[in-house]
Image (tube, helix red, strand yellow):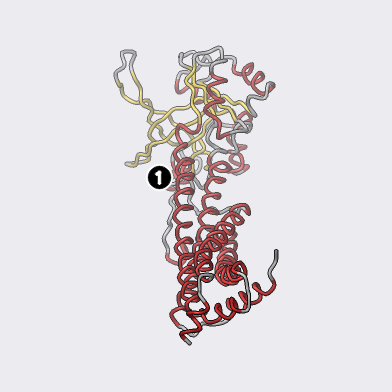
C-alpha cells in the first residue's frame, strides 16, 4: 500500500543537502558511479551487438555458410540436380559451384598470399552478397572476359593497376606427393571489391571455367557452396546434408574458419557485463554508506517519528526512498548518455581516429576496420533494471537499522 507520509518525508530527505560534507561526497560518488557503470555497460553491449551483426551481415555475406568439397579428382559433375533438390526441400536458400586454389601474387619483388575463388557470377548471387561490394562496370567486365577481381587492400598493398597482368604462383605436387616447381597463372586485373573486412586482404575472384582449367577440375566442379537461414546452426545442418549427398565430400562451414570470432564476441560480452555490473554494485555500496551515515545524522528525527507512532515499515520506506533516489538518478543519467553513445558510437570512434591519426581496428587483423554499434532496447531495459534492483537491495540494511533507533536513548542524550 502506498504510504504518502513516508514518501513525502523520504523525498524531502533525498532532496535536502546534508550538513556533513563527507556524506555529500559519498552520495555524489554513488550517483556518478552508478551513472558511469550503466552508461559504459550500454556502450559495451551496443558494440558487441554491432560486432555480431557485422559478422552476420558483412563477413558472412561473402564467406560461404557451408561448403562441400569433392574428395575425388573428378569433382561434382551434376551439381545442378543437387541445387534443385536442396532448394526445393528448403535445406538451402541458394547453391553455387566453385573451384578454389591458393597461391602467391607476384608483383616485382613483392609476394602476397591469396585465395582465388572460381565462381559462376549468376549463381554466386544466390549464396553471397558480392555484387554489393563490386562496381557495376567491373561486374560487366567479369561476365565478358577472363580476369580476376581482387580485394581492394591487395591492390593497394601491391600497387596494382586496372587491366594489369597479375601473376599468381600456384604450388604443385607430383603424383608421388613431392613438391615440384609452382605453376604460373596469369590473370588480368578487372577491378577490386571493398567489404571493409579482412577478406579484402586475402581473397580474389575469377571465372569458374578459368579456375577449373588452371587446377585440373575439367570434368566437374570442385565443390558447392550453400547459403542457409540459420547460420549459427551451420555445423549441424552441414552434417545432415553432407551425409545425404551421392558423393564423398569434405564438409566445412563458416565456423571452422571464423567461429572463433563469434565465440570471442560472446565471451567478451559476458565478461564485460559481469565486470561493469560489479562496478554498479560497488557504486551501490556507496548508497549503503550514505544511508548509514544519514541514519546516524537523523536519529533525533527517527526518535520523534517513532514517538508519534510511526510504524517501522514506514521508517524503512523513508530511507529506502532516500537511497533509491540516488540509484534512480544515477541510472537515468547513465541510461541517457548510454543511449546517446549506443546510437552514435561509430561516429564518435571515427572522429577520435581522425583526430589522433590512428586506426584502432585494422582490416587485415580484425574482420572489420571500424567500430560497429547496434543499440538494442532490451539491453537498455535490462541494464537499467539491474542498476535499480541493486540500488533497492543496497537500501535494505540501512533502512532496517533505522527502525532499531530507540527513542528513549536518543531523547536522553539531548
Residue at horizontal 44 percent and vertical 53 percent from the top: 361
**Left or right, 134 with reference to 74:** right
Specify the farthest residue to the bottom.
Answer: 414
Q: Position of residue 313 (x, y in %)?
A: 61, 66
- Percent from the top left, x then y, of residue 203? 47, 37
**Residue 97 or residue 136, whichever sits in front:** 97
Quadrant for the N terminus in the image? bottom right
Classed neighbour count for the residue bearing mark 1: other residues with Cα under 10 Å, few (<14), some (14–19), many (≥20): some
Q: Secondary structure at mark 1?
A: helix
Q: Nearer the viewer, residue 227 or 229?
A: 229
What residue lies at 56% left-to-right and 81% top-to-bottom? 301
Judge whether 110 appears above or below 292 on screen: above
235 left or right, relative to 86: left
Rendered view: 331 above or below 364? below
**Residue 161 in sight here:** no
Q: Which residue is mark 1?
A: 158
Q: Residue at x 47, y 72 (%)?
A: 292
Q: Position of residue 360 (x, y in %)?
A: 43, 56
The answer to which image quadrant residue 357 occupies is bottom left
Residue 394 placement (x, y as % from top left): 51, 63
> Measured along the vertical axis of the image, is residue 162 above or below residue 34?
above
Q: Toward the viewer: 335 or 68?
A: 335
Q: Nearer the viewer, residue 17 or 225?
A: 17
Count the numbered circles shown. 1
Q: Confirm whether residue 236 shows in the render.
A: yes
Amino acid at each position: 500500500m502506498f504510504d504518502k507520509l513516508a514518501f513525502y518525508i523520504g523525498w524531502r530527505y533525498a532532496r535536502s543537502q546534508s550538513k556533513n560534507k563527507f556524506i555529500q561526497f559519498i552520495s555524489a560518488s554513488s550517483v556518478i558511479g552508478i551513472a558511469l557503470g550503466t552508461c559504459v555497460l550500454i556502450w559495451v553491449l551496443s558494440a558487441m551487438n554491432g560486432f555480431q551483426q557485422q559478422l552476420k551481415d558483412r563477413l558472412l555475406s561473402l564467406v560461404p555458410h557451408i561448403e562441400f568439397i569433392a574428395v575425388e579428382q573428378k569433382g561434382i559433375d551434376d551439381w545442378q540436380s543437387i541445387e534443385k533438390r536442396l532448394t526445393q526441400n528448403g535445406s538451402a536458400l541458394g547453391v553455387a559451384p566453385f573451384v578454389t586454389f591458393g597461391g602467391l601474387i607476384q608483383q616485382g619483388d613483392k609476394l602476397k598470399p591469396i585465395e582465388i575463388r572460381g565462381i559462376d557470377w549468376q549463381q554466386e548471387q544466390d549464396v553471397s552478397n558480392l555484387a554489393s561490394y563490386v562496381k557495376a562496370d567491373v561486374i560487366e567486365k567479369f561476365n565478358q572476359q577472363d580476369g580476376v577481381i581482387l580485394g581492394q587492400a591487395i591492390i593497394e598493398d601491391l600497387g596494382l593497376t586496372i587491366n594489369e597482368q597479375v601473376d599468381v604462383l600456384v604450388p604443385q605436387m607430383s603424383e608421388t606427393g613431392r613438391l615440384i616447381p609452382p605453376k604460373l597463372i596469369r590473370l588480368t586485373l578487372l577491378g577490386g571489391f571493398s567489404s571493409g573486412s579482412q577478406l579484402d586482404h586475402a581473397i580474389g575472384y575469377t571465372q569458374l571455367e578459368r579456375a577449373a582449367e588452371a587446377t585440373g577440375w575439367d570434368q566437374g566442379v570442385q565443390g558447392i557452396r550453400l547459403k542457409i537461414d540459420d547460420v549459427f546452426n551451420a555445423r549441424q545442418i552441414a552434417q545432415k546434408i553432407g551425409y545425404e549427398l551421392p558423393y564423398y565430400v569434405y564438409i566445412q562451414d563458416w565456423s571452422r574458419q571464423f567461429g572463433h570470432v563469434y565465440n570471442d564476441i560472446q565471451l567478451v560480452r559476458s565478461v564485460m557485463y559481469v565486470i561493469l555490473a560489479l562496478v554498479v554494485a560497488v557504486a551501490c555500496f556507496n548508497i549503503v554508506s550514505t544511508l548509514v551515515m544519514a541514519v546516524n545524522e537523523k536519529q533525533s528525527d527517527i526518535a520523534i517519528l517513532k514517538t508519534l507512532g510511526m510504524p517501522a515499515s514506514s521508517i524503512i520506506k523513508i530511507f529506502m526512498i532516500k537511497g533509491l533516489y540516488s540509484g534512480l538518478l544515477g541510472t537515468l543519467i547513465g541510461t541517457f548518455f548510454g543511449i546517446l553513445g549506443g546510437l552514435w558510437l561509430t561516429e564518435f570512434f571515427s572522429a577520435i581516429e581522425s583526430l589522433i591519426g590512428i586506426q584502432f581496428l585494422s582490416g587485415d587483423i580484425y574482420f572489420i576496420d571500424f567500430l560497429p554499434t547496434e543499440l538494442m532496447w532490451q539491453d537498455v531495459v535490462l541494464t537499467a533494471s539491474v542498476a535499480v534492483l541493486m540500488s533497492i537491495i543496497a537500501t535494505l540494511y540501512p533502512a532496517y537499522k533505522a527502525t532499531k533507533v530507540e527513542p528513549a536513548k536518543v531523547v536522553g542524550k539531548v
